[in-house]
Structure formats: structure tokens, C-alpha cells
């Protein structure tokens, strides 16, 4: 494995453990983010949107989607190409969300952190789908946030995420992955979630990734 593949191309992401400081990093990165990730052949948004579309072969227009860790809106753009038109985005970085707003894809943009706690202003069973790309990483979305995802997605709805499994801070770092799995296991025991798939994919030409999908049961 060459070093370009092994290392995270954006090392400035891993200089802090503080969520607030990470948000400042994204604020500074927002202007060049799209160009930078495109330059690395980032596939997350395309792949997760396609994966979600498989669950909705028709009638995508009215499926109500929340994109968590929406950033500059790359996922929303891909969803719209596939016929999804009712999309909200959530991210703690206002400058990233301003880029997302400029895509004209999102109905509502929520500037806040997504955690295991109830999201202010978002009721139980508010969405058909939660989608996310590139945000289930160390220091980003917390490993227990599926608790909140299962609350705000209605029964029968889908949670579908893609994330990186190689490079610094990736999803497969033992502590992050183990904590995530423990929370999912608990939610499955409570009959709140049902596994659909864990599928290995290429997150970019330089790093592997995984698509994870669950159905919400209650
Ligand atoms: C690598 S970017 C991915 C952005 C976009 N989904 C994409 O695929 O291009 C990670 C995003 O997660 C956001 N983020 C980090 N912690 C978060 C949290 N607790 N809740 C919501 N978003 C968070 C960051 O602000 C950043 O915009």
C-alpha cells in the first residue's frame, strides 16, 4: 500500500479533539472543500445516493431525507440527480452550509451538531431517511448518534451512510467502530433497528470505505 493510499490527505482534520475546533477547521476549509475532495476522487456522495435510490425504485420525490454532516451539499446534489427532492441538511459549520444553500437542493438547513440527544426542533418520526457521507469518523459524528437517528426516522424508514475505513481517524479505528457496533447492537435488541447491509466499497481511488444501511422498526 503506498503512502498516498494509507494517509489521510487532509491531516489538518486530526489536529484537534474538540468538536468546536473541528468546526472551525471546516469553516476555514469550506471555500476549497469541493475542489480538494474532487481532486482526491472522492466517491462518497455518488455511492451513498445510488445506494439509497435502490431502496426507492420509484416515488423518490416525496421521500423526506435528512443529510447529516451535510457539509457543502455534495450528497444533496447527487440525491437530486436521482429524483429525490425533499432534502434537509444538518451540519455545525455555517460556512459549509452556505455552500450547501447555494446548490438550491436543500429545503431546510440546520446549523447544529448531531448527537445522541434529541435534535432541537426535530420531532420523532420526522424523516423517511437519514443519509450521511464522510462524517462517521473520529471527532465527527459521535458513535452513539444512531440513537437519535432511530428516533427521528419513522418506522419503515432507512438510515444509509458511507464512510472511510482507511487513513487516520477512519471509521475502522478499533475504538470508534467498537463503540458504534455496541450502540447498534443495543438498538437491535430493543427492536428499533434491523440491519440491511454492511458493504465494502471504494471511498476514493485512494481509500476503502463502507456503506452501512439499517431499517428503522419503531
Ligand atoms: C468530511 S465532511 C463531509 C461533508 C459531506 N457529507 C460530503 O460528503 O462532502 C464532514 C462534515 O461533518 C460535519 N460534522 C462534524 N461533526 C458533526 C456532528 N456532530 N454533527 C453533524 N455534522 C458534523 C463537519 O462539519 C463536516 O461538514
Image (cartoon, grey):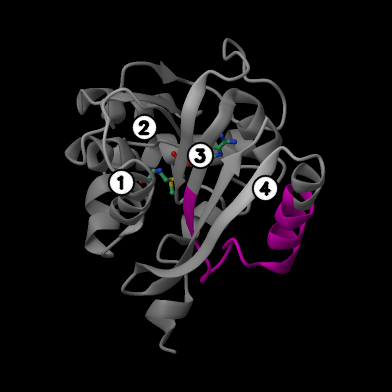
Name the quadrant of the C terminus. Answer: top right
Asked whether the residues under the numbered discs 2 and 1 touch, taking CB atoms below 8 Å apart as contact, a structural biologist would say yes
From mark 3 to mark 1, how far is it between C-alphas?
28 Å
Q: What is the number of the mark on residue 96?
A: 2
From mark 2 to mark 1, how far is it between C-alphas?
9 Å
Name the image quarter holding residue 94. top left
Find out if the beta carbon at label 2 lies less than 8 Å from the nearest ligand 1 atom.
Answer: yes
Residue 216 drawn above or below residue 133: above
Q: Residue 194, image x and y in percent?
A: 64, 48
Magenta stretch: includes residue 116:
no
Q: What is the number of the mark on residue 17?
A: 4
Disc with the residue nearer the chain's start (3 vs 1): 1
Asked whether the residues under the numbered discs 4 and 2 touch, taking CB atoms below 8 Å apart as contact, a structural biologist would say no
Residue 180 drawn above or below residue 167: above
SS class, disc 4: loop
Q: Nearer the viewer, residue 194 or 95?
A: 194
Task: Kindly identify which residue carries mark 3.
Answer: 158
Label 4, residues with CA under 10 Å away: few <14, some 14-19, many ≥20: few
Of all residues, the one furthest to the top in this rendering is: 121
User: What segment is highlighted magenta in the picture?
Assistant: 161-184
Asked whether the residues under the numbered discs 4 and 1 touch, taking CB atoms below 8 Å apart as contact, a structural biologist would say no
Q: Residue at x 67, y 47 (%)?
A: 17
Disc with the residue nearer the chain's start (2 vs 3): 2
Q: Residue at x 46, y 66 (%)?
A: 209
Q: Disc 4 or disc 3, which is closer to the eye?
A: 3
Q: Residue at x 52, y 41 (%)?
A: 159
Q: Nearer the viewer, residue 135 or 161?
A: 161
Amino acid at each position: 500500500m503506498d503512502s498516498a493510499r494509507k494517509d489521510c490527505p487532509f491531516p489538518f482534520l486530526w489536529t484537534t479533539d474538540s468538536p468546536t475546533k473541528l468546526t472551525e477547521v471546516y469553516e476555514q476549509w469550506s471555500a476549497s472543500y469541493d475542489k480538494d475532495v474532487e481532486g482526491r476522487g472522492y466517491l462518497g456522495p455518488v455511492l451513498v445516493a445510488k445506494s439509497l435510490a435502490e431502496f426507492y425504485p420509484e416515488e423518490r420525490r416525496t421521500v423526506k431525507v435528512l443529510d447529516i454532516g451535510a457539509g457543502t451539499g455534495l450528497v444533496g446534489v447527487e440525491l437530486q440527480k436521482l429524483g429525490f427532492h425533499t432534502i434537509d441538511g444538518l451540519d455545525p459549520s455555517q460556512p459549509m452550509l452556505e455552500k450547501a444553500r447555494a446548490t438550491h437542493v436543500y429545503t431546510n438547513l440546520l446549523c447544529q451538531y448531531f448527537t445522541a440527544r434529541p435534535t432541537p426542533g426535530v420531532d420523532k418520526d420526522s424523516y423517511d431517511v437519514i443519509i450521511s457521507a464522510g462524517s462517521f469518523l473520529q471527532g465527527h459524528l459521535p458513535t452513539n448518534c444512531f440513537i437519535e437517528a432511530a428516533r427521528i426516522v419513522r418506522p419503515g424508514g432507512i438510515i444509509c451512510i458511507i464512510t472511510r475505513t482507511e487513513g487516520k481517524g477512519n471509521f475502522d479505528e478499533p475504538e470508534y467502530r467498537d463503540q458504534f457496533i455496541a450502540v447498534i447492537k443495543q438498538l437491535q435488541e430493543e427492536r428499533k433497528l434491523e440491519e440491511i447491509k454492511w458493504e465494502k466499497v471504494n471511498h476514493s481511488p485512494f481509500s476503502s470505505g463502507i456503506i452501512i444501511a439499517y431499517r428503522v422498526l419503531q
